[in-house]
């Protein structure tokens, strides 16, 4: 699961301002907020001393005219810029009135369910969801083992026929050849690998590496070859990929019985980082994100 595999990178990343994305301060100390808000509060685009459109962190605008007032908003960037600056400005005003300190919340709210009076540590809803995740993942891993290993013989050492490109576009040729499976990421496979749409933070690809003609390639069509794998389980990218045509010689590797019950810590990372609402509808930047709550309930009921 992407959010779990990258958790250490996220924890040790450098802190940057939530508004301008510069290091050394936060959005409630950012020196650019007040000057930008003078323009944005009047629904005007902030300009520099030379009359050019300012790009502030992720916020900016594409233009189709030399006149800044006749610009076209790309992907609603102006409205998101306005909202971000307004939030930072209100925060700076509030902290200034409170002596530079953040006003303490009068009521605790849970970061997972959003209800008042408790935190994630005491959230019964989150604890139940974790139990459901463990059960659902056990059911999915049993089904995955049956299809991938027992039925197809997909394992390290299996001989497979693959299709791949030789040469570079536009003069590349499609070739077929035999290869040996050298690696499979059994440890990180989980029930979200079967989602039929992609989740940015719960992306869980099935990575099958094949050695063919001295080159290591990754099978890219796992979501069309195996029913147990969905789009969220498809490897990302195109470089050095190949397509599985058939399994020539199966190699039924016996995984340890504990594999069915492992990887629980990934779901614990998930609920620490994301709210119940986000698990249901996805991030605002995602299109057609899977409903992870419903997906868990679906696999929890399967035996």
Image (cartoon, rainbow, N blue to C red):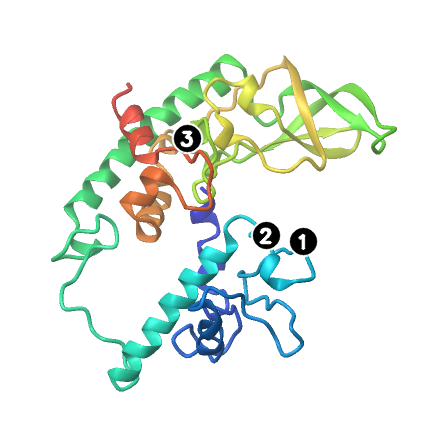
Q: Residue visible at 16% across and 62% down?
A: 108
Question: Which callout, 3 or 1, points at the residue further toward the start of the chain?
Answer: 1
The image position of residue 54, as x and y in percent, is 59, 69
**Residue 125 visible in the shown view:** yes
| Above or below, comparing residue 154 to residue 287 in the picture | above
Quadrant containing the C terminus is top left
The image position of residue 1, as x and y in percent, is 44, 41
Q: Residue visible at 67% across and 76% down?
A: 50
Q: Residues within 10 Å of mark 3 (few under 14, many from 20)?
A: few
Helix, strand or loop at label 3? It is loop
Q: Residues within 10 Å of mark 2 (few under 14, many from 20)?
A: some
Q: Residue furthest bottom?
A: 99
The Cα atoms of the two marked residues, 1 and 2, are separated by 7 Å
Helix, strand or loop at label 2? It is loop
Q: Which mark is residue 164?
A: none
The image position of residue 233, as x and y in percent, is 50, 31
Specify the quadrant of the image occupied by residue 201.
top left
| Above or below, comparing residue 102 to residue 190 in the picture | below
Q: Is residue 301 left or right of residue 258?
A: left
CB contact under 8 Å: marks 1 and 2: yes
Q: For mark 3, what is the residue?
A: 256
Q: Which mark is residue 64?
A: 1
The Cα atoms of the two marked residues, 3 and 1, are separated by 60 Å
Q: Residue visible at 53% across and 48% down?
A: 75
Question: 158 and 166: which one is in front?
Answer: 166
Question: 52 and 207: which one is in front?
Answer: 52
Question: Which callout, 2 or 3, points at the residue further toward the start of the chain?
Answer: 2
**Residue 8 visible in the shown view:** no
């Amino acid at each position: 699961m992407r959010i779990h595999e990258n958790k250490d990178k996220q924890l040790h990343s450098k802190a940057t301002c939530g508004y301008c994305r510069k290091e050394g301060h936060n959005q409630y100390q950012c020196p650019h907020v007040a000057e930008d808000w003078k323009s944005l509060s009047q629904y005007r685009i902030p300009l520099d001393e030379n009359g050019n459109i300012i790009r502030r962190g992720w916020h900016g605008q594409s233009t189709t005219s030399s006149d800044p007032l006749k610009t076209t908003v790309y992907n609603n960037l102006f409205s998101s810029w306005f909202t971000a600056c307004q939030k930072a400005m209100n925060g700076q005003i509030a902290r200034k009135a409170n002596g530079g300190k953040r006003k303490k919340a009068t009521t605790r709210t849970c970061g997972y369910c959003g209800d008042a009076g408790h935190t994630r540590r005491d959230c019964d809803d989150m604890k139940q969801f974790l139990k459901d995740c463990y059960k659902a993942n056990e059911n999915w891993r049993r089904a995955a083992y049956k299809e991938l290993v027992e039925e197809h013989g997909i394992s390290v050492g299996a001989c497979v026929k693959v299709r791949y490109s030789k040469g570079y576009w536009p003069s590349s040729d499609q070739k077929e050849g035999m290869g040996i499976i050298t690696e499979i990421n059994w440890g990180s496979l989980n029930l979200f690998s079967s989602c039929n749409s992609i989740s940015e933070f719960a992306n869980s690809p099935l990575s099958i590496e094949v050695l063919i003609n001295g080159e290591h390639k990754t099978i890219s069509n796992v979501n069309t070859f195996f029913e147990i794998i969905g789009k969220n389980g498809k490897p990302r990218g195109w470089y050095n990929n190949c397509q599985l045509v058939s399994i020539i010689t199966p190699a039924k590797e016996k995984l340890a019985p504990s594999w069915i019950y492992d990887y629980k810590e990934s779901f614990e990372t998930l609920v620490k980082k994301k709210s119940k609402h986000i698990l249901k509808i996805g991030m605002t930047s995602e299109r057609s994100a899977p409903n992870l709550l419903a997906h868990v309930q679906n696999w929890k009921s399967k035996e």
